[in-house]
Amino acid sequence: MGLTEIILILVIALILFGPEDLPDIARTLGKVVFEIRKATNELTKEFQSSLDTPANVLNKAFEQTISSKTSEQETVILPKEAEDISNDEKLLTYEDEKPDDPLAELPLDMVSYEEKGASR
């Protein structure tokens, strides 16, 4: 818009609304424009974050994969050290970690133990 167009719009607004109501209208119009810009910025940020989230998850997974590979490469055990570790400490196996009761990990209010021989 050029300067003459802006002046023409202001003159028409002055004639239509009068000098008393013009400041109130300008203030209200400014608030509306501010709220529209604020909502637009929030939508843009939300949209951008939803686009960035999968990329961030993939980047984290990639970084963790790289860091775990480097930590595996850094921990090299010499044969003598391996013998000392195996003699001094016994490693737990998966079978050692399994509880006798498979329902032991569930909350008590979810599990009901029936007595053997009890009928329904």
Image: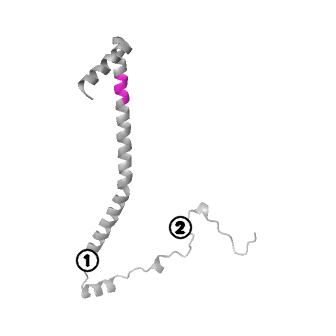
Q: Amino acid at mark 1?
A: Gln
Position of the N terminus, as image quadrant, is top left
Disc on res. 105: 2
Q: Quadrant of residue 23?
A: top left
Q: Residue at x 36, y 60 (%)?
A: 57
Q: Residue 27 at what x, y percent from top left?
A: 34, 22
Taking 26 as reference, is 89 above or below it?
below
Would you say residue 30 sits in the magenta stretch?
yes
Q: Secondary structure at mark 2?
A: loop
Taking 32 as reference, is 110 above or below it?
below
Magenta-highlighted stretch: main secondary structure? helix
Range drawn in magenta: 27-32
Q: Residue 102 at what x, y percent from top left?
A: 56, 73
Read off the residue under disc 1.
73
| Tag 1 near tag 2, CB within 8 Å | no
Q: Residue at x 34, y 31 (%)?
A: 34
Q: Residue 114 at what x, y percent from top left?
A: 68, 70
Query: Front-most of 70 and 14?
Result: 14
Q: Residue at x 34, y 81 (%)?
A: 89
- Distance from disc 1 to disc 2, alpha carbons, whole Å, reads 36 Å
Q: How is the image coloured?
A: one colour
Instruction: Tell me: 52 left or right of 73.
Output: right
